[in-house]
Amino acid sequence: MGTDVDFVVAGAGGGLAGAIRAAELGARVLVIETNSHFRSGNNTSMSTAMIPGAGTRWQRELGLEDTPKTFVDDMLRKTHGTVDLPLAEALAGISAPLVTWLADSIGLPIELTTDFAYPGHSVLRCHTIPHRTGSALLKGLLDRASQLPNLDIMVPARVVDIAGSPAARIVVIEHPDGSLEEISTSAILLATNGFGGNAELVKLHIPEMADAHYHGSAESRGDALTIGSRLGADSGFLNAYQGHAALSYPQATLVGWATVLHGGILVNLDGERFGDETTGYSEFGHMELLQPEHAGVLVFDRQIHDACLLFDDFRQTVDAGALRWATSPSALAEQFGLPKQTFINTLDQVHMYATANSACPFGRTSWPHDLDRSDLVGVRVTAAIFHTQGGLRVDQHARVQRPDGVVIDGVYASGGSAIGISGFGASGYLAGNGLLPALGLAYLAGEDIVTRLGR
């Protein structure tokens, strides 16, 4: 029996990688996207375009040795052994080919991030593009998609159900006027992200972040979970998420954790540090949420400021007027209403740590820069949840599974729609653990459907 298309992809974010890969291999592909403003408003476009790759040519050019096993070991360590191992191995294994494909087929100017090491990665393996902005990454995917005559994008429209038999899935689409349309396909990829935009689901599954600001696409409403449950799909790791402790307030721009990794600190409104900032920006979000007014102040100096201008997100924070400058600790404390002497004492302690004259009681050992107190800058920040990391359980080909492990034929999931590789909670998140499952699982799904079609 014929179908309208070979492959439907629900979501024009990271799912485009699967759509493009399948189309390159000869499949007829239809992408369905809910958000008319997805080019700047979905989670892929809002990312910093960091994609881990283990064993790439960019690493080899710098003499760096890395393997998928090393990457998996890092994931096991960061998640305390809770990561889904077959999925972690599949994504680590595809990571280098994926980054290479993004460069050679999509045409992105891929580069290896070498200015600092992201927490949890034992090797420099985060690849990105100039200006480190997800909108440029998404534009590159869309430009490549436009070159493929067998790939179409329908927007705005929303996938609301999947029916039919494994031989011919029926995708039910809702248009803005409420009308429904059915499209037959051999397979569908659910790439609608997670449920960060659904306050009730966040409260249910991630209660610790119920009061956090959500900084992601409003269309991340848990559609994949709803549709998958009707099909009898299993789900897991629903309390996993990427948090962040560096969203400017009230501007709601991403300041970025590069400020910390270059030597900055985070204090609460009492003027005190409250943990090892280099542990990770995801888990530090919840720690910040426990502070007075759910807030903090990122403190750094001009040298760190200038180093962070590589990031478009940071430049947007500067342009938004979120930064406050001061020529002394007491003057900066006054800018933010911090207790002056407490804040001065905090900076005195940080100076001791940075000059190796004292050990940080929180265990922070990375102090690449001693802050210049005559040229300080601060940003008030608040805790945020960027995207959820749990979802439908999938195998190493991104195929959705039932609780007994049986594959639901013709149904795939990627990104926040799938279980991901961050284990439970926020502490297992590694930089790039959002984009790798988003792009990597979609890529694997695109290849698998073409194999099933016999092309």
Image (cartoon, helix red, strand yellow):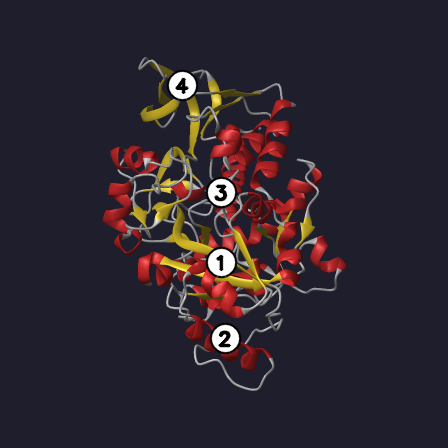
The residue that mark 3 highlights is: 438
- Residue at x 60%, y 27% (from the top left corner): 145
The reply, left or right, for residue 308 in relation to residue 415 is right
Residue 190: numbered disc: none
Label 3 Cα crowd, 10 Å radius (few <14 / some 14-19 / many 20+): many
Q: Are marks 3 and 1 in contact (CB under 8 Å)?
A: no
Mark 2 vs 1, N-terminal side = 2
The residue that mark 4 highlights is: 184
Q: Nearer the viewer, mark 4 or mark 2?
A: 2
Question: What is the quadrant of residue 163 in the picture?
Answer: top left
Mark 4 vs 2, N-terminal side = 4
Going by the numbered disc 2, the residue's amino acid type is: Arg
Q: Is residue 129 visible?
A: no
Q: CA distance from mark 2 to mark 1?
A: 18 Å
Q: Nearer the viewer, residue 60 or 248?
A: 248
Determine the secondary structure under disc 1. loop
Q: Is 78 placed above or below 155 here? A: below
Task: Give percent across and percent down for residue 101.
Answer: 65, 41
Q: Are marks 4 and 3 in contact (CB under 8 Å)?
A: no
Task: Give percent across and percent down for residue 185.
Answer: 43, 22
Q: Nearer the viewer, residue 387 or 69?
A: 387
Mark 4 vs 1, N-terminal side = 4
The residue that mark 2 highlights is: 364
Q: Are marks 4 and 2 in contact (CB under 8 Å)?
A: no
